[in-house]
Image (cartoon, grey):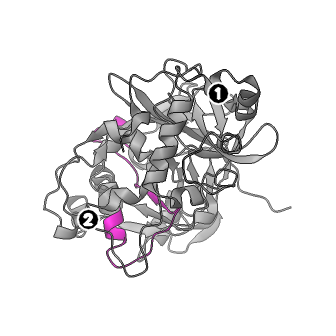
Amino acid sequence: MPITANNPARKSWVDIPPKSDFPIQNIPFGVFISKNDVITIGTRIGDYAIDLGALQQLHYFEGIELTEDLFMQDTLNDFISAGKITWRLVRNRIADIFDISNPLLRDNAAHRAQIICAVAEVEMQLPVQIGDYTDFYSSKEHATNVGMMFRDPANALLPNWLHIPVGYHGRSSTIVPSGIPVHRPMGQTLPNGENTPVFGPSRLIDFELEMAFITTDANVMGENIPVHEAEDYIFGMVLLNDWSARDIQKWEYVPLGPFLAKNFASSISPWIVTMEALEPFRTKSPNQDPTPLPYLQQKGKHAFDIQLEVAIQPENGDETIVSQSNFKYMYWTMSQQLAHHTSNGCRVNSGDMMGSGTISGPTPSSYGSMLELTWGGKNPLQLADGSERKFINDNDTVIMKGFCKNKEVRIGFGEVSSKLLPPFVRK
């Protein structure tokens, strides 16, 4: 069954701005509270939110085998569990409904009023109930930079890094959608030159430019997923800002790695862009040397050319772009990450989220964290308002954007934007 939704020649009767991240070829999936205060699953075309619950109730999905309330839920988990064939049928049908040549909904004003509204009128929610969250560490440039700062510069990469996709388990309880502010965490740190730790607000709050993929039900406990099948179990991707407290991290990460420095907040973009929409933007991964073990070996194009940028906006100020990177720089691919994750029989479920790890490129302007951009605070960045940043200040907003583009179409993720607030004060 072809992916007809991806036809680059397709036009829509919905007005779509020229540089929109959401042309009719995208058709991402999300969850929102409608202008009528009803929570529903939806998609987006241009600057319009499409209520898929209403679309289903009005019988626009006839002929596709769906449970009656599939799009009238508060998470996408059940839809994701329905599998790849259902995802494709639904995306193809939505593309047909909104095709410029199809009058069925276009010429039905009453139905349009129930189904379509401006994105500005809806409140985006977390798109899935995230049961488990794993964060990888898969950018060679990032791992090298951090290794040079935190350890021996001559041995920046640990011996296992070139052999396995390194990762750790995070907390799903503090993953929030774009627009939800984040509080500066309290924690234990060791001040420079001291032998005794102190407890207080983290002074070195950082962003981490990442992307994350969302899985479907992939296996049963004890079963591994072969690397050549792994992409069949990946539904789509979001932008991820994996907030970090670098001073807490430096003190706690030995011997077991990230803990409280990472799990206080992670922010994601609310629209999940499907892997099928990203299909035209496949590209080759970086060369892997040494060759991975057989269970991680793959041929073909398994990376994706996704242009990324990060901006910092001070309170009452203009935003300044501080990083421009690309997802294609990642050393380990998503399919290798998922294959390794399940190689020991670990179960992966619908709605699980896997973070890429910080995405850093080969040049300083493409580094994916303030830790690298300022080299641990030694080289502050100047913002458009003249102020300087070593790390993120209270009331700064961090904005991440991402999109793919070729000569025919642009497919984007929108943005993940979140403001850093002072520490939470218990009333």
Q: Quarter-wise, where is residue 306 in the image?
A: top left
What residue is disc 1 on? 105
| Distance between mark 1 and mark 2 Cα atoms | 53 Å
| Dot 2: element | loop
Q: Residue type at mark 2?
A: Trp
Residues at discs 1 and 2 in contact (Cβ within 8 Å): no
Q: Magenta residues: mostly which secondary structure? A: loop
Q: Which residues are magenta?
A: 338-367
Quick one: quadrant of the C terminus? Answer: bottom right
| Dot 1: element | helix
* Mark 2, other Cα within 10 Å: few <14 / some 14–19 / many ≥20: some
- Is residue 261 in view from this perspective? yes
Report x, y in % for residue 38.
78, 46
Q: At 31% across and 66% down in the image, what residue appears?
A: 339
Q: At 44% across and 75% down in the image, what residue appears?
A: 347
What residue is disc 2 on? 161
Report x, y in % for residue 145.
31, 52
Query: Vertical placement of 285 versus 18: above or below?
Result: below
